[in-house]
Image (spheres, grey):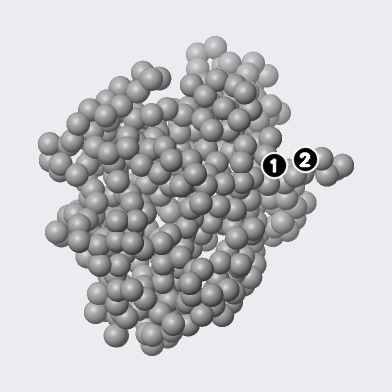
Amino acid sequence: MLADKYMTTLADLKPVTKQFVRDIAEKVDHTGHVSLDNYISMMSGQPSTVDTETDCFSIWSDIADAGNDSANPKVLKAGTDANGHAGGGCVFPARVKTFPNQLDNAKLTWKGYMGDMGNDLNRDGTKTCSFPTRTAKLAGTDPAKAVDGTQSAQASSASGDVKADAYATRHNPFVYFHSIIDDIDYCDQHVVNLDDNLENDLKSIDTTPNFVYITPNLCDDGHDGDGTGAAGKGCKSGAAGGLTSIDAFLKKWIPIIQASAAYKQDGLIIINFDESNASSSPMTTTFNSAYTQMNLTINLTGESCCNQQTGPNVKRPEDQIMSTLPIAYASTLGINASSLPSTVQTIQIGMHYDGVGGDRTGAVLLSPFIKAGTTSTTGYNHYSLLKSLEDRFGIPEYLGYADDSKLVTFGSDIFTQ
């Protein structure tokens, strides 16, 4: 499997240009591990913080604004956040703009469609614009102590009182920017549940946003399950997961999108992965001196391309602790607890980063206007994707590291019109 997660983007480029892509296979190096920093770089050009590079797994905090990076004034330097993390934090201050903000300024429309968001309101808080501090507030708890409760999927109960829910906040880039979430009504209009909204919005050109961003749930994106359908190997929803569920998702939605008037007129679909499969990376196991904790470290090569910069907030090589879990979670990590010393009480999951990237995957682009079967071996990354989208929509400036003059954008090796 090329990667463990993907997202789909449909761009209706009608107001700008008729240069499109169809059936293109590309080489893409991604901008980080594990997930979140890829989504952020794709929509803002901003690099990792020490928390976004580990999915803000057990914390949720604002990024302290420490000014601009001396090497690139379009990149934010993160200070020490409320959790005491230097170069840390999850949510960017309002002055950091995103691609959706650029679309707003250009009088173009956009929406993010999130798989499963709000399936269980006790878990996600809301079916629109769901993020931890908002969910905590809706639940009557302290937003300052909010954590992301969507890091793993939730199975439905036998009675049906609890609904299956595999929405993951870390795969929803829009809620990590105060420039979007500070206006809740605005965010509610633009970040919505996939199944409740997309097919209806595609019914006419006028109701189809110029830019559509789709994130499948944790099963449909191939993150969960091994795809075999074997007992105990699938998603919590009961689906097979892996490539089996990815294929089923695409077989459902791609024909619906391609049948829409907006796509037929001048559409572009980008099927893209956020990173390579981290679970295939070498792992090392150690124990503390008392053998009460097992330390599981994932060693990430972090291959990158396109002169990618580390940014001001992280360093390489670097070691980060992602989470510490009770031994009861061993089976969910694929660990047989009975094979461990009986003294082990906790499992600490760590990441060792060598490179700054997210290693290599591919992408597929579809459009009515380009010869099918075209392939490209040109290297791109998420900053290249952002810059390419800015070009195609006629945006007059580039955000963050998308402003690198050395970045290659989708060009003549792809477009025929």
Q: How many marks?
A: 2
The residue tagged 1 is: 120
Q: Position of residue 398 (x, y in %)?
A: 22, 56
Q: Nearer the viewer, residue 269 or 109?
A: 109
Percent x, y of residue 227: 65, 59
- Seen at 41% across and 67% down, the residue is 210
Q: Earlier in the sequence, mark 2 or mark 1?
A: 1
Q: Is residue 405 left or right of residue 42?
A: left
Residue 106 to residue 43: above or below: below
Residue 128 rendering spot, x and y as whole percentages: 57, 46
Residue type highlighted by circle 1 = Asp
Q: Circle 2 sits in a helix, a strand or a loop, which is it?
A: loop
Q: Quadrant of residue 181?
A: top left
Q: Is the Cβ of the residue at disc 2 closer than 8 Å to that at disc 1?
A: yes
x 34%, y 56%: residue: 104
Q: Which mark is residue 162?
A: 2
Side (left or right) of 110 relative to 416? right
Q: Nearer the viewer, residue 87 or 395?
A: 395
- Percent across and percent down for residue 205 are 49, 75
Q: Residue at x 36, y 73 (%)?
A: 13
Q: Which mark is residue 14?
A: none
Q: Is residue 12 above or below residue 212?
A: below
Q: Residues within 10 Å of mark 2 (few under 14, many from 20)?
A: some
Q: Secondary structure at mark 1?
A: loop
Name the residue at 51% across, 51% down.
189
The reply to whether residue 298 is in sight is no
Q: Residue furthest right?
A: 159
Amino acid under label 2? Val
